[in-house]
Image: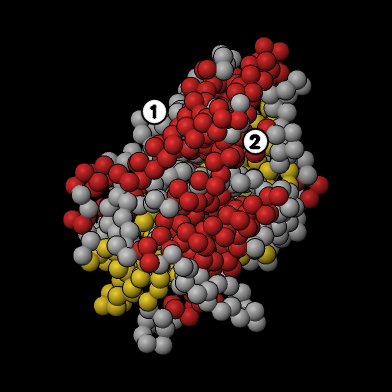
Amino acid sequence: SVKKLKLSSMVFFLSFLLLWGLPTLLNGLSFSPNASSHLVPPTLQAYNPLRKLQIFAQTRQLDSAPLDESIQHSFDAIVVGSGIGGLSCAALLSHFGYSVAVFESHSMPGGAAHGYSVYNKNIGGTFTFDTGPSFFSGLNSDFPAKSSNPLRSILDILGEEVKCAPYATFGLKFPEGDFLHSPKFGLSGGVVDAVSGARGVEQWRKLMKAMEPLANAVDAMPTAALRGDVGVALTAGQFLPNFAKTNPLENLKLTSPFSKIIDGSGVTDEFIKNWLDLLCFCLSGVPSDGTITAEMAMMVGEFYDDDAIMDCPIGGAKSIVDALVRGIEKNSGFICCNSHVEEICIENGRAVGVRLKKNPEQLISAKKGVISNISIWDLMNTGIVDTNHFPDRFVSNRKATPECPSFMHLHVGFEMAKHELQKLQAHYIYIADWVRGVSDDENCALVSIPSVHDDTLAPNGYAVLHIYTPATERFERWENVKRNTPEYKALKEERSEFLWNVLESIIPDIRQRTIHSQVGTPLTHQRFLRRHKGTYGPAIYASEGSFPFPTTPVEGLLLCGDSCFPGIGVPAVAGSGIIAANSISLDTIVPQLKVLQQLKSRNSG
């Protein structure tokens, strides 16, 4: 009956608030005592349409001059770090009308998603490489958007597009043989059928059936509706009718480990379970018994809907970063590179601004708050904040956050004609031995060959690739090795040999074709990304805990990135940036509601 449906919806919504709202309050909900008098958004700053939207135009301005009276040194919000999470947060705040500055230690924005280029004088051309994420979906503006994809949501809010080449398949190199992954992976004639037969196909069907209502529940509440304060009742409450046809008890499974869904669906086939463990590990850094079901519920549709596609951003992941930077700059925000934040300043229990290493005497004030896009270990352990301002329990809990291992990377520029590239896949997932497990040393690798779809990354007749181990390289092996020493060079060669061997299973003569190669190590991650132990991110198991919301016990200090909800991965960190922006003050409620209406209109159009 209608009454039962309404009651069911209310039960789920209350459960949602209890699951996410209560931890938020316990993690340090705070807002200005007079915040209720500021429910009107700040006046939007004028945008000059003649202004050139050049990446880092304002970066160069701030980097070339001291912060004196000629340059603004007071902002509504300051973001420390320019990863996808920080840029998403800054972009949304600037869209709301806030004055925003992003301070980044590196010479370019993007965090793990930044790219780099190498000119090779022997061929008279340039190779362009991604340094981090390479699997993307849901970005292509030529295809309908899903409300469960936070990065696509923020791009649509900003009116920015990322040109993408769509593709539907990628390569699998497994102990059972070589396969092509496609949306038909678990169907008759697909990979599961080839390995496990009809019995495996039936188990896959039951699992996908069990995931349908969970995927619908994830779609029912867009990330853009969430916030870390009491305003969530206004912004998320309007989506209550979306849950009318869902089962609240089933929806509570979204917070459980995905392995419970696998087991509850009757999946016993070892190949399917191995594949799902590997997929979870690639997405979140932990196997299925540690990955939250909500993350997989969002992913299932991206991979296994009949019309599912992957996206190859033209120009590499940097094109995503550039789109976010454009979104910030066109609303008069600043991206300040080569600007290391020495201190996040806290006075009287409130974050009031930052001081830069290059000008520590100058306080750059933040009227509304400071958002940290650095990892929780770097926030708590490096002295960037005085931890005496936090409760002891908060500090000890955050410092004890378990971390995933790091990576080995190999970037290669190589000779290959276009007709040869067309015989390759843009991605390959490799595993040597299921018995050793997905997290075992030198057992798994991910390969990205974007030149298969994007000819802008290398000169004609050449291509680029990036291969890496997914969070299986232990930092302890490297921590006492000094860079630029013979010992470091020898260890790089030793630890990259596995990657070369994997490449040779795809391109047998890759070493002979190579024009340029470069090895990245955990120390590379630690140095260029200022990443604690070069880690992939927190190893928070769904059965043992949950990622905290962005608020902290210090008023006006929020977090974004993979150290907080929703977790690891490009969509997740973009979501964390959205939630942090929404949560900076109660006066974001009105512009947030406008954004939600904008997204509704987009989805219904």
Residue 481 in the image: state x and y as whole percent. Answer: 33, 48
> Which residue occupies 36% across, 85% down?
68
Q: How far apart are the two marked residues, 2 and 1, measured between alpha carbons?
A: 24 Å
Where is 165 relative to 540, above or below?
below
Residue at horizontal 48 percent and vertical 68 percent from the top: 41
Q: Residue at 64% across / 52% down in the picture?
A: 600
| Residue found 40% across the figure and 32% down from its top | 541
Q: Write down the residue under mark 2.
A: 301
Going by the numbered disc 1, the residue's amino acid type is Ser
**Along the viewing direction, whichever of 481 and 431 lies nearer the viewer:** 431
Q: Are marks 2 and 1 in contact (CB under 8 Å)?
A: no
Asked if residue 94 is positioned above or below residue 486 in the image, the reply reads: below
Q: Is residue 485 visible?
A: no
* Relative height, residue 318 to residue 448 (above, below): below
Q: Quadrant of residue 34?
A: bottom left
Q: Is residue 318 above or below residue 430?
A: below
Q: Dot 2 lies on which element?
A: helix
Q: Position of residue 2 (x, y in %)?
A: 60, 30
> Badge 1 is on which residue?
543
Q: Residues within 10 Å of mark 1 (few under 14, many from 20)?
A: some
Q: Amino acid at mark 2?
A: Gly
Q: Is residue 420 left or right of residue 336?
A: right
Q: Quadrant of residue 401?
A: top left
